[in-house]
Image (cartoon, rainbow, N blue to C red):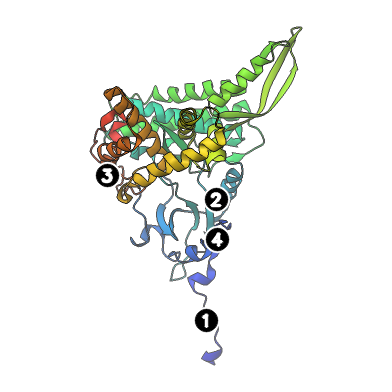
Amino acid sequence: MDTQDATPSPSPADRLTVTAAPSGDATEDPATSLLALPWQTPLEQWPADVLAALPRGISRHVVRFAHMGGGVVAVKETTEDLAFREYRLLRRLEDLPSPSVLPVAVVSGRTADDGSPLPAALVTRHLRFSLPYRAVFSERLERRTLVRLMDALAMLLVELHLQGFFWGDVSLSNVLFRRDAGGFAAHLVDAETGELRERLSTGQREHDLDVARVNVGGELMDLQASGLADPDVDPIATPDLFLDSYRQLWQQLTEPTVFPRHEPWRMDRRFRRLQELGFEVAEYSLRGADAPGMLVASPTDVRSGYHRRRLERLTGLHVQENQARRLLVDIEAARRAWDPYLDIDHAAHRWVIEVFDPVVRSVPLELRAKLEPAEVMHQLLEHRWYLSEARGAAVPLQEAVDSYVETVLRARRDEDALALHPTTTMLRAVPAPGGADDADSASR
């Protein structure tokens, strides 16, 4: 046999198939970055120089965070069918848009150096400044923190249900949390069991709620057994906090409004109330009621993120909903102080240049991984209020910034670069002076 004519056997790289969507960022080449990862190696054996030391939640699959290009991605090994199903679903949620992680790619056809097959991998972008629920607190889960987590999970599920998303596996483990102006914002990270439909039935929504009750209760029992929850945290009763929060919000967003025909302002007042909650009625139906002279207005398309979208339209800043609400209040206060007749668009532009940007630049480089800029701004405003209250006079912005950086921010852990596994090594709580951000003193 002429060895020169022999066809060389394909390498693991030759068998690889990458399915990805362009990022739209001209400075980023996702294909090149993806191919640089060691796909011929089982995920559990990836080298330390590839991995990002971030806290992981509980998962039925092998999941690792890895450096890719200039960012960090989550890589999950699963079957090829499940990887593509979840990838397609996350892309549809991204288009809505929904509070979920962003899909990057599916990598299939993986083989080891010896030719043995390896599982397919789903790649998603890591959500910066986010934490699994076990890393939200440092030593013990306090009840006040738990209430905020339940509210955030309820808000997430309401948002997803409004968009027709049936989750099928609601749990704290399938969510990442980001700080949101004293509370938390929840983001979906595991859509493996989900389905996206035009509209959900009451039975489908109730099924998600039943699953959540069981899963959340079980997760809290696990925390309690591990000694990570305060004694007053009741794993049996706590899921009811989530259910009550969900049902109250769902009712406010979807129930019809009945009002006299000559009082249409009642409908406008209802819609403004929904805006205060962070939702916007994009479409509604109006019909005559059974009683003479009465009308019924029913929201038919309700969308979340009202304050978030308004702030982004005014300033270009992309932040969480409660952060947006807080920053909009500060913009309005600044507008009134500068010139009550100044329109809001010009005031917002001036606020970014004269307030927000200088605050962000005042944070030393080594502290910028502590919190995202919008959360820093919120906490600074709270800190400045406490300082002014104690002094009995308004404290200048720069003085408040200097005090906040040294007495509050410097004591926090880095939430964008957390290198400790939350179930093994815990940081000791450092109380923050000045009263800034009472979301959970034990998470500092």
Mark 2, Cα crowd under 10 Å, few <14 / some 14-19 / many 20+, is some
Q: Position of residue 234 (x, y in %)?
A: 34, 23
Q: Which residue is mark 3?
A: 424
Q: Position of residue 266 (x, y in %)?
A: 64, 14
Is residue 33 toward the left or the right of residue 396 in the image? right
Along the line of sight, the residue nearer the viewer: 347 or 330: 347
Quarter of the image that includes the N terminus = bottom right
Along the line of sight, the residue nearer the viewer: 1 or 293: 293
| Disc 3 secondary structure class | loop
Residue 18 higher or lower than 124, as above or below: below
Tag nearer the camera, 2 or 3: 3
Label located before the other in sequence (4 or 1)? 1
Mark 4, Cα crowd under 10 Å, few <14 / some 14-19 / many 20+, is few
* Amino acid type assigned to the residue bearing label 1 in the image: Pro
Residue 340 higher or lower than 50, as above or below: above
* Amino acid type assigned to the residue bearing label 3 in the image: Thr
The residue at 56%/50% (across/down) is 87
Q: Which residue is mark 1?
A: 8
Label located before the other in sequence (1 or 2)? 1
Tag nearer the camera, 4 or 2: 4
Separation of disc 1 and disc 2 at Cα? 32 Å
Whether tag 1 and tag 2 are in contact, CB under 8 A, the answer is no
Separation of disc 3 and disc 1 at Cα? 47 Å
Mark 3, Cα crowd under 10 Å, few <14 / some 14-19 / many 20+, is few
Is residue 211 something that shows in the picture? no
Q: Which residue is mark 4?
A: 26
Label located before the other in sequence (2 or 3)? 2
Tag nearer the camera, 4 or 1: 4
Label located before the other in sequence (4 or 2)? 4
Separation of disc 2 and disc 3 at Cα? 30 Å
